Amino acid sequence: MLSRHPRVAENMGVYFITEVGMMIEQFASYFTKLERLSSLELHRSAEKLVLVENTSIAKLIAHLAEMSARKTALKLGYKSLYHYCINGLNLSEGAVPARIHVANVSRRFPQLLVALAESRISLTVAALLAPHLTEENVDDALSDCAGKTRREVEEYVVLFRPKPVFEPSIRKRPAHLAPAGPGRSTPSPSPSTPQPPTVQTTRHSPNILQAARAEIYNFRFSGGREFKDKFERLAEVLGVGNAQKNMAEIIEKALDIALEKKDPKKKLERRIKRQRCAKTKSRSNEFVKKSEPAKSRYVASEVSERVHERGAYQCVFRGLDGTRCTARTALQIDHADPYGIFQNNDESVLRILCASHNLLEAERVYGADFIRRKISERRRGKSKSRSP
Ligand SMILES: [Zn+2]
């Protein structure tokens, strides 16, 4: 019998090589098959594979639950089910805890496995819910969390068990963990200073943003000395006493100021207000002239702001099955009728796309090779202009 396990296969030399060769051939022809699929067919096929994968994960979890009840891992010589998963089943360390968390409650709540197998919830979501489930809440929890992301479910489960809220504080990081770089150096620790082990601290560093209770979030991040100095200076400028205690208030004020300045929504509101004032003051057609389409691909900022508003500040790209892109940052103005072909700069043909979809559209219209050439020409131009 041919073994698929490399450890056994080592002793079976030629068979193993033949088998690997066959598998490589199989995958080569599989790629050829995939190349013939349309994008939508490729998506449907991936969806089916996810269903198969999730069903298989649910079944594996059922195995783990059974093994846990029978203490199979111990009987096989492993010190725990966790170690059995890693050393006996070759699962990655990151993959094991979620499976075990779900396994622990899966006999009591088999509906959790069904939801997982049907891809209504992900394994991460199942693991987050597992410790909070009761006979009373299980059905509601599963329907409430269907299709939700990890972040959304983290917010959901704090309703069951609120977390402690952080006391605001500024603490100096241990020197060996401080980010390197100019202006961020910290004095090296004296030999007598006890240092926590680096690996542990890095691996177990908590999420920077976690829901603590309904409507309250814990933030945790590190900043350099410059950041700290700016923060304390801002507290002075804003007239907020006790910077450490009122950290949230200071940061919220800074966010308001930044959004007021940078948010396209706010810019548009300000412009509309200004235009209204100007109209009542004089009947000059200065602003009408400004909105006229330019004779180049240049888009005036007030037009750009209206296009952002029309797109509700989100990339307007829709996929083959109608799914809209969720990107809301670094949006770019794109000509729906390619400017290079139609030379039309009218507001009605403008739309906002994220950088990736803008590039995808440009490649669709002009061809990937052409766009690649243009990008490298532009990069070369920039590096020339930078060199002395
Ligand atoms: Zn997009």
Image (cartoon, rainbow, N blue to C red):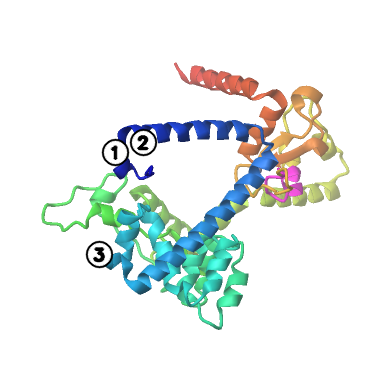
Q: Name the outermost residue toward the front.
A: 1
Residue nearest the observer in this picture, 29 or 344: 29
Q: Of the residues under marks 3 and 1, which one precedes in the sequence?
A: 1
Give the secondary structure at mark 2: helix
| Tag 3 near tag 1, CB within 8 Å | no
In the rendered structure, which disc, 3 or 2, sits on the residue that comes first in sequence? Answer: 2
Q: Is residue 135 above or below residue 251?
A: below
Per the rendered image, the range of residues in magenta is 305-318
Q: Amino acid at mark 1?
A: Glu
Question: Residues at badges 1 and 2 in contact (C-beta under 8 Å)?
Answer: yes
Q: CA distance from mark 1 to mark 2?
A: 7 Å
Q: CA distance from mark 3 to mark 2?
A: 31 Å
- Location of residue 381 in the rendering, given as x and y in whole percent from the top left corner: 55, 18
Residue 10 — which label?
1
Does 117 appear above or below 164? Answer: above
Q: Amino acid at mark 3?
A: Lys
Secondary structure found at label 1: helix
Foreground: 254 or 173?
Answer: 173
> Where's residue 234, x and y in %?
45, 56
Q: Looking at the rendered structure, which numbered label has been put on residue 79?
A: 3
Q: Quadrant of the N terminus?
A: top left
- Quick one: 314 or 92, which is closer to the camera? 92
SS type, badge 3: loop
Taking the image as shown, residue 254 lies to the left or right of residue 364, namely left
User: What residue does disc 2 label?
Assistant: 16
